[in-house]
Image (cartoon, rainbow, N blue to C red):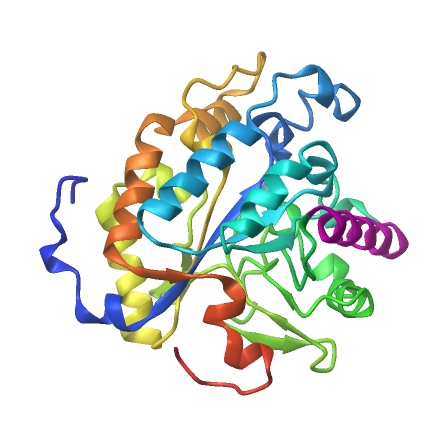
Amino acid sequence: MTDSTNSTSVSSASQIHCNAMTVDVEDYYQVSAFVPYVERSAWDNHESRVVANTDRILALFEQYNVKGTFFTLGWVAERHPDLIRRIVDGGHELASHGWDHIMVTKLSREEFSEDIRRSKQMLEDAGGVEIQGYRAPSYSFTKKNEWAHTVLAEQGYRYSSSVAPIKHDLYGIPDAKRFANPQADGQIIELPITTTQIAGRNLPCGGGGWFRLYPYALSRWAINRVHKQDNERAIFYFHPWEIDPQQPRIEGLDLRTRFRHYQNLSQMEGRVERLLRDFKWGTMEAVFASELTGKQNTTS
Ligand SMILES: [Zn+2]
């Protein structure tokens, strides 16, 4: 499979299912893999690229008439309220990615509660809209923090997209449910990042490094497989820094971290464009409207 495969093989299933397009709005120096290399207290010393990169995504979405969900750090909203207003004015959904990208596995229940309260408030003040959704930094809902969904419901969130039903060295709950499921006694819906099942194993096909490292045609095949085999909608995510090959390099990274972060950055924007062309996309709250209003098993 190569990146040059044309679009004629896209099945009709691609056009029936409206999938959720999401962006995790954070800057290149804030990723979890850089925690050992970049002091959180020194974040403001780094060149900020998140505004320019997110504006490029907004322009791209407008070009393809796609509305998406922007899971945004409270830390970013505090410094760039104009960007938050542009996201909302573009007709997109604003949602929370926590305050400053501390993985939930590193927080106590009380610290997590404060993190999601503060980020919700900041985003609501900047955007003038109610925040319903949350995505944990690095999909860090694991078996160690099973209280997390309850705390989200307590703070007024209606859905979470924080579970990766995969085996990974940094995150994931390999045996978690793969699609929309109620949590915290039905007070909140979990919408896990999309996987496809092959030989009993869940493989990620909803974005991240996987999308950048492997040929585009493999991702398209996997998303089509989710439509056909599971009769489900996909949730895709990417980051503003992934379409920015010119971003300043962080020094001293170990080989694996360097590879994962920088590989194929120059191809990313073109691949996202192909996704926008090949599938139908909407916001989380639009695509999963039936689940969020309590009516299950209805595809859009
Ligand atoms: Zn993130």
Q: x, y (%) of residue 2?
A: 16, 40
Q: Is residue 130 left or right of residue 286?
A: right
Question: Where does the magenta region start and end?
Answer: 109-126
Q: Is residue 118 magenta?
A: yes
Count of numbered badges drawn on the protein: 0
Q: Is residue 99 left or right of residue 239?
A: right
* 294 over 43 or under it: above or below: below
Q: Which residue is drawn at the image coordinates 46% and 70% (left, top)? A: 287
* 75 over 138 or under it: above or below: above
Indicate the quadrant of ligand 1 in the picture: top right
Asked if residue 36 can be seen in this view, the reply is yes
Query: Which one is nearer the viewer's eye here, 282 or 88?
Result: 88
Query: Which one is nearer the viewer's eye here, 259 or 131?
Result: 131
Q: Is residue 136 magenta?
A: no
Asked if residue 170 can be seen in this view, the reply is no
Q: Which residue is drawn at the image coordinates 25% and 52% (left, top)? A: 277
Q: Which residue is drawn at the image coordinates 25% and 46% (left, top)? A: 274
Q: Which residue is drawn at the image coordinates 66% and 48% (left, top)? A: 97
